[in-house]
Image (spheres, rainbow, N blue to C red):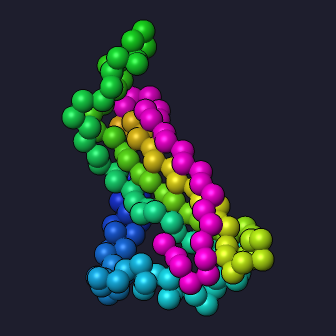
Amino acid sequence: MKTIFLKVFFLFFVITNACAANHFSNDVVEQRAALEQPSRDNSFLISFYKPTYFLPAYYTVSPYREIYNGTNQQNLKNLEFKFQFSLKVPIIHQIFGYKSILYFAYTQLSYWQAYASSPFFRESNYEPELDSRKKGEEA
């Protein structure tokens, strides 16, 4: 199981870096807006919002141990799995008659104690957002 996971992670890492290297420029925001332009009016389009990444080996120097008083602190490890994913979807087009779009975006950042004897999520941060943009102004 770990071997399959490592292969999938390696493939994701290679593809992500190859895409970033091919499309890197000083006008990243403009380039992204141009790529999203043809599909902007598709209400069912789900796209990336903030960076999405998976770090299977993330070392936390000092996890906040005080909140775990009264629990099994030996289970808390410095090595953990960290990931963030972020998506956005357009929900309303032409708000108040203007050429604008209302987006719903969701970002989740989690620290998973995957290498502990009894794995648990040490911390999860949820960030739902509503964002309005004029057509042609993307980020």
Q: What residue appears at the point 27 percent right and 34 percent down from the top-left corner?
A: 78
Image quarter of residue 26: bottom left
Q: Looking at this view, is 22 or 128 the one in front?
A: 128
Residue span colored magenta: 116-139
Q: Residue at x 61, y 81 (%)?
A: 135
Q: Is residue 15 left or right of residue 91?
A: left
Instruction: Looking at this view, name the residue that lies furthest to the top.
Output: 70
Q: Is residue 137 magenta?
A: yes
Q: Residue at x 45, y 44 (%)?
A: 110
Is residue 15 inside the magenta stretch?
no
Q: Residue at x 52, y 54 (%)?
A: 107
Residue lying furthest left in this view?
61
Name above or below for residue 96 compared with residue 129.
Answer: below
Res 72 visible:
no
**Residue 115 shows in the view:** yes
Q: In terms of image quadrants, where is residue 81?
A: top left
- In the rendering, at what x and y percent does residue 124 appear? 48, 39
Question: Looking at the picture, how far across and down is residue 86, in whole percent?
Answer: 51, 60
The image position of residue 17, as x and y in percent, is 31, 75
